[in-house]
Amino acid sequence: MELDETIFDRIHRYLAGRMDEPERQQFVKQMELDEDLRTEVEIQRQIKAAYQISRNKTLLDEIHKELQHQGHLWQPPKLEPANNQGEIAVEPVVRKINWGYIATAACVVLALGFGWYFYLQNDNSPTNEVTKQEPEPNLPDTDAVISPGLSSPEPIQPPAQTLPSSQPRRKNQADTRYAQLFKENFKPTVRHNPEEPADKPRFAAPRSVMEARLRIPEDTAAILAGIQLLRQGKIRQAITRLQPATDCALPDWQANAQWFLALAYLRNNQPAKARPLLQRLTAEPTELYQSQAQRLLTNLDQ
Amino acid sequence: MNSIKLPSEEICLPFQGNEPAFYQALLAEQRQAFNCLYLRVHNQFIPLACQKGGSYDEALDVLNDCLAIFLHKIRTGEFVFQADTRITSYLYRVCYNQWHNYIDKRQQRKEVSLDLNRPTSDKDDNDDDVYDDTISLLPDEQYDEQERLEWVTRLKKAISQLREDCQNMLHWFYVEELPLREIAARLGMTEDSAAVKRFKCAKYLRERYLKA
């Protein structure tokens, strides 16, 4: 059954209880006979319920703030040393300042600061490399490469030929196979669909939408950091960074996070975790990684 | 558990000892009834959850989810008041159920932790003491909160893929339940055009919702 305007309108009049009794009875009878109509009513019922539950959550947030402000709500006790006698501790109004302690603390802070500074000067650590500006790579025409700022296309380095030698190779033979699949599929480029214009910023959107959108820069940074960590062979760290971004508000970003997380799982010898992500990507409407995910799933099944 | 002095005398005064009046006020969506409900369940459930190893924020999320669903059930008539029950006690059990679920999931997440050096059987000190045996769980047929929360998650994903005008249109339609005439006036279009637009947006949302 193709959903048309008339059916849509009838379903909503039924759900809102705006049908008169004969019409309602006729509609119920029609539902009993027509499975497609029943399904459609259920889908619309779910969407309507989800909308109203979200609205209620916003209302309850307001109520919480109001009651908390009035001091009516229970608060978790603050962690303070127990006073068995039930006496109220009295703090001196003016404390004697112990300059000796302050001087020692200052020396320690300075020493740590200098140590950290010199460490950073000499450090070639991957954490710093994540934020470095890197040269323009040769990229396939079909892939759009973007920067953490989202606005201007900026490069991410091409894949390292080998993983750093500091990463110990696993003894497990299966791992070698997954590592090979990872190597074949990993290209440190973020894809997005340039034909799909980005949404305008919304100032009147429901709170949940605003919250999801406010997380986009964080998700972008997580995806890019995840890719760099994968390049450096820091697979577990990459997994940790990429996981939250798989629910990004931008579908393209979601697809990127899912793809790289799947590769990370594979590289970490966890094909069972990679598989559902790849399956989601094959059904992805953005089609960014659809064919690669399908190919990889086929390889995994062999 | 710490003894809690409920400051509900004032806020809940009109409903004190009168559950049917409380239910009627909730049905009529009276703000004072909502405040009273929130206050009672919050001060009953949150201390228990915190005492049993949950954080305040985690417990608050669970409470918020359960209350939001409960208010929806009242509105749609899915929750029907029974003379011998207390609404707060029922909700307390629902929250406890949901919290039980949440803790189970948290436990599962720990078991598949990425920290491979840690034996999977390891548990935090608090994990053995998270449940309260004195509270019985609701039977499955009375408990569908988890399913409804999944609808909300899917809807959020679907909405985020809509354009602003569609988001507004559907918010007015599904949440505010504005008549088409008023929606058309807000958009500066005829009712017929508004009906077409509403249908297109709803259809697009439906597709995204099913894929989410």
Image (tube, rainbow, N blue to C red):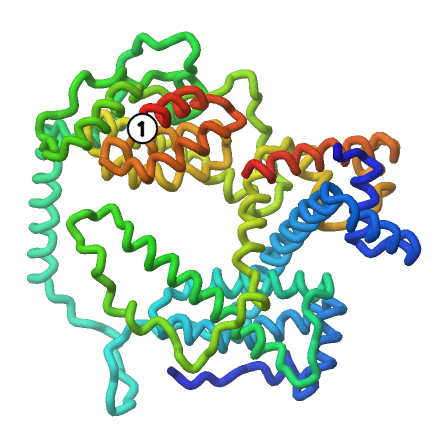
> Mark 1, residues whose alpha carbon is within 10 Å: few (<14), some, or many (≥20)?
some
User: Which residue shows up at 55% across the image and 60% down it?
Assistant: B145
Q: Quadrant of residue A163?
A: top left
Foreground pick, B73 / A209: B73
> Height in image: B48 above or below A290?
below
Q: Could you say where residue A166 lies in the image, as x and y percent from the top left?
A: 9, 30
Q: Could you say where residue A160 lies in the image, as x and y percent from the top left?
A: 20, 18
Residue named by callout 1: A300
In this view of the protein, can residue A48 be seen by the observer?
yes
User: Which residue shows up at 53% across the image and 70% down it?
Assistant: B139
> Height in image: B85 above or below B178?
below
Foreground pick, A22 / B33: A22
Q: Quadrant of residue B74?
A: bottom right
Tag 1: amino acid? Leu
> Height in image: A241 above or below B14?
above
Question: Horizontal placement of B87 versus B46: left or right?
Answer: right
Q: Could you say where residue B183 lies in the image, as x and y percent from the top left?
A: 81, 40
Question: Horizontal placement of B74 versus A177: left or right?
Answer: right
